[in-house]
Image (spheres, grey):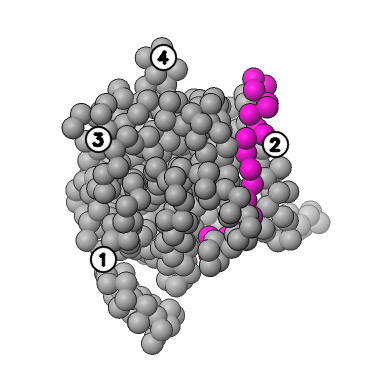
Amino acid sequence: MSINKEYVPVADFYAGRSVFLTGVSGFLGKVILEKLLYSCKHINNVYVMIREKKGVSAEERFRDIINLPVFTRLKEERPEDLNKIIPVTGDLLAPNLGIEKSVEESFVNKVSVVLHSAATIKYNQQLDEALNNNLEGTRRVLELCQRMPRIRSFVHVSTAYSNMDREVIDEVVYPAPAALRDVYTSIKQHGVTDEKLIKKILNGKPNTYVFSKALAENMLVDQHGDIPTTIVRPSTVAAAMSDPLPGWVDNWFAATGIFHVTGSGNNRVIFGRKSNVLDIIPVDYVSNLIIVAAARKTQSKDIPVFNSCSSSCNPVNFGEIFMYLKEYYVTNKYHDAYPMLLFSRNKWIVNFLTFLLQMLPAKVADVYVRTKGQKPRLVVYNILVVFGRRKPSWLWNRLPRRMSAGSNPKGTHLCLF
């Protein structure tokens, strides 16, 4: 079947539909929400699940979110479309997502598309907590989909690193790294503090994050039933290429944090090789793919998988990235110290150089500011780039077809690749 028969033109698909979106407080979720409203003008409503946090209600958090620069063009051009957003108090970790029954009844018969981008991004979270977030949270969203009589599409955002223990990663769901029942039995019997046991359970996965994401993919294969389900696997999500604002980013996690502390001269040592490729993908590329991937015409029970990665078509290694960072930070005088970067795959050497080049100068600087009567501030940056250690190859056979199918012929691309 051709791609044009599998998928509907994006704006047409969303016209008159209502969407349920998770993860809207996150970097990717904000961009998805803005793009849905801006490019799909005739969308009905977008229900966004937001949890209460530190005594701040979901409604208050929502107001803070829509005041961010990401929504500037929507406010300037079509501010009335912001009224299409309906915040829903919920919690990924709670039974039934923590959504009150009366609230669920207000939208469950209206929603036909669910986009699930919420997840924990703590790479070394306790195993039981990672499973509750990434696996059980996804299961709870799937159960919500199963209560929606009009459901047409469910898109789950996984990660390109869910199978990074493989040399080649195709757009398929691979066998689970462990039997879930055995994992829970082990946790119940032995807890989650025995590092050797946890390493054995992870079965080659580098951390609990990718392990739980891999299990979530397998859970969807086993339990999605008649729900048309799609999995999107982004690699390291970075600042926007163009939408909603060129270069827009709202956090210091992952690539953003690494780039800043390195370009500013605060981090001088990285575990890995200069030639290691860092797979980074602009956030708007990912959000557009998620939106497009939902626009399925068929009700096939197969789960399409899309790898959203850059290294297969446009690879860039750490050495090249550092060259660009150094030029930018020095030219614009954003550096605290002159940028330099050493690479090693020996942990002892990395730790020694980190002490010599980062910790020791920082401590000396703190002693100096104490003599001036100022408050000392010791900041130690020790970047261990887990996802730069290996060099898997991601296949993305679906994307070239989706590019042409998801692009607006007039030039305003709904799917920007």
Say if 11 sits above or below 24 in the image.
Answer: above
Measuring from the top left, give residue 410's x and y in whole percent. Answer: 41, 12
Q: Which of the two residues, 238 or 28, is positioned nearer the viewer here?
A: 28
- Whether residue 81 is visible: yes
* Secondary structure of the residue carrying numbered label 4: loop
Disc 4 or 2, which lies upstream in sequence? Answer: 2
Disc 2 or 3, which lies upstream in sequence? Answer: 2
Q: Amino acid at mark 1?
A: Pro
Q: Nearer the viewer, mark 1 or mark 4?
A: 4
Q: Indicate yes or no whether the magenta region holds residue 410.
A: no
**Which residue, given by chain and number where applicable, does mark 3 sit on?**
398
Q: Mark 4 packing: few (<14 Cα in 10 Å), some, or many (20+)? A: few
Measuring from the top left, give residue 163's x and y in whole percent. Answer: 27, 55
Q: Amino acid at mark 3?
A: Arg
**Which residue, given by chain and number where applicable, does mark 2 sit on?**
67
Question: Residue 224: which numbered mark, if any?
Answer: none
Identity of the residue drawn at 39% across and 18% down: 408
Q: Amino acid at mark 4?
A: Gly
- The span from disc 3 to disc 4 (Cα, nearest Å) is 21 Å
- Whether residue 326 is visible: no
* Secondary structure of the residue carrying numbered label 3: loop
Measuring from the top left, give residue 280's x and y in whole percent. Answer: 38, 39
**Which residue, given by chain and number where applicable, does mark 1 sit on?**
177
Disc 1 or 3, which lies upstream in sequence? Answer: 1
Q: Across the whole image, how many numbered discs are drawn on residues? A: 4
Q: Amino acid at mark 2?
A: Asn
Residue range in magenta is 75-93
Does residue 312 appear left or right of residue 16 in this picture?
A: left
- The span from disc 1 to disc 4 (Cα, nearest Å) is 43 Å
**Which residue, given by chain and number where applicable, does mark 4 sit on?**
411
